[in-house]
Amino acid sequence: MNLQQVICTLAGKTKTDKNMLVKMNVVTIIGSGTMGNGISHVFAQNGFNVHMMDINQGALDKALATIGKNMDRLVAKGTLTEEAKLQALGRIKTFTDMVEAVKDADLVIEAASENIDLKLNIFRELDKHCPANCILATNTSSISLTRIGSVTKRPGKVIGMHFMNPVPIMKLVEIINGYATDAEVTQTIFNLSEQLGKVPCVVNDYPGFISNRILMPLINEAILALQEGVAGVSEIDTIMKLGMAHPMGPLQLADFIGLDTCYSIMHVLHMGFGNQKYAPATLLANMVQAGYMGVKSGEGFYKYTPGSKELVVSARFATKQWKQ
């Protein structure tokens, strides 16, 4: 199915598509990390029964606490009532057993680490244990939907639903069609995204899709510029913020995304296109191998101190400070 066919399909919303959406009640989220708990938050707040699954109960408890804190911020801003918050939290159930988590699911969204072997194994298990009519979605930001769908017996019901971080705030959902994804499934996910208050954009299955095919080479080029000594961390980010109106510089954004995630996506682009221009910067690879992952590890291109919002360049990248 090509993109033009999808666009034509989306222009005419059928009764079948709407019926599928009406029947969607239980949404299972696989993974309770940053993306998993954010996706769970949004679905619960919009009236869906959420099954949040992780192999680690401690991670699930931490995720629930994070969702509660994020909802408290919305209450403080007046965009969510205390009653609505409590109702939303009451819709979330946690599971450490995948079979139990998915047995009644109408939609499953996998939000595990960006590791292809892990994702393929998860989808093999989902295909075995999910109801026959269940749609299997992934929040992957770069891995082929066609490949993921190929390990299931329902490739027509496999689709990408790429949310942006932070999920409760960011409006975009990048919907990715695998080669075999059914148009009816695309329409259902398109409608569902709108129901969540998001803006869906449909793309086809090529490495990095649109978001990361454009964003990650930009970040990688910024890292190469730093690696080659063209400019320092602060200078690179300041130029992109003030000169190109980016709300966050590429190196700070890389820290926020996670340098390990950036490396994984660049590797997918490099392997998928077979083009050297997508090769991850050596500096990026070295930082990941050394455990400097950005915000999640406390240090990347910047140093992060709990409770502080001050942006401090890592001492490893300290440069001469020019006087004003």
Image (cartoon, rainbow, N blue to C red):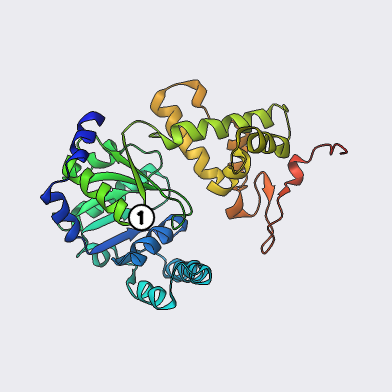
Q: Where is residue 300? Give x, y as percent.
A: 65, 46
Q: Where is residue 118? Give x, y as percent.
A: 36, 48
Q: What residue do we see at 74% from left, 42% from top?
A: 316
| Mark 1 lies on residue | 197
Q: Which amino acid type corresponds to the residue marked 1 in the rendered image?
A: Gly
Q: In the structure shown, which secondary structural element does the residue marked by tag 1 occupy?
A: loop
Q: Is residue 267 visible?
A: yes
* Viewer-side residue, 22 vs 293: 22
Residue 16 in the figure: left or right of residue 1: left
Neighbourhood count class around disc 1 (C-alpha, 10 Å): few under 14, some 14–19, many 20 upward: some
Residue 85 in the figure: left or right of residue 10: right
Q: What residue do we see at 84% from left, 37% from top?
A: 320
Quadrant in which the C terminus is drawn: top right
- Tally of numbered tags: 1
Q: Quadrant of residue 211?
A: top left
Q: Quadrant of residue 187?
A: top left
Q: Where is residue 105? Give x, y as percent.
A: 22, 62
